[in-house]
Amino acid sequence: MKIVVGISGASGTVYGVRLLEKLGLQPGTETHLVLSRSAERTAFLEMGLLAPDLKKKAAHSYPNEDIGCRLASGSFRTDAMVIAPCSIHTMSAIAAGISSNLLIRAADVTLKERRKLILLVRETPLHVGHLRTMASLAEMGAIVMPPVPAFYHNPKTIDDIVDHTIDRVLDLLGAPSPEARRWDPGVRT
């Protein structure tokens, strides 16, 4: 499976990092990373990570300015793309078809080729323009998945909350994590 992972500058870099880590454990999965410049700054501010630290977690990485690389073409076969986290700016540009950088172009290619695009949109509260843009993306075939935490699995740490969201993403990709904690009202953990 070939998965494109995009990380934008929204808060929540940990979602993209954890997704890369979990996909790296999946046999036969190849990850292709695109970081926005804002993502590089946010990764450092939130996690103390530099771009090379993030790029080491992926099988392949590409400069966001490389609009001519293979991810910018529908002829390069991938299975899905996840942008985690996805900023409102990135979400809006994808919805408008403004392919001004590789992150947005790769998402546009994913949609036009009818491949799975999952957006972990990180913003709150949302105004009606945000909601209309999300509805537009859903109509185009994207899956809009704000990382809203669940608590039925009795999380003890932030990592538990992050992992639960990423495990749901893996489910959507058809690559479920064996460690995923599932809803079972008869079991208390």
Image: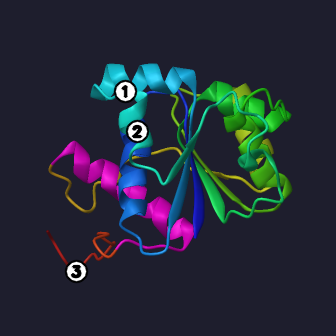
Which is nearer the N-term, disc 3 or disc 1? 1
Q: Looking at the image, is 20 positioned above or below residue 158?
A: below
Give the residue drawn at x 32%, y 55%: 163
Q: Mark 3 sits on what residue?
A: 186
Which is nearer the N-term, disc 2 or disc 3? 2
Left-right relation of 127 to 43: right
Would you say residue 131 is visible in this rendering? no
Give the residue drawn at x 72%, y 48%: 71
Q: Mark 1 sits on what residue?
A: 50
Q: Mark 2 sits on what residue?
A: 54
Would you say residue 154 is visible in this rendering? yes
Q: Which residues are magenta?
A: 157-177
Q: Position of residue 185 (x, y in %)?
A: 27, 75
> Callout 3: helix, strand or loop?
loop
Q: Position of residue 146 (x, y in %)?
A: 52, 44
Dot 2, how many residues are within 10 Å of its Cα: few (below 14), some (14-19), or many (20+)?
Answer: many
Dot 3, how many residues are within 10 Å of its Cα: few (below 14), some (14-19), or many (20+)?
Answer: few
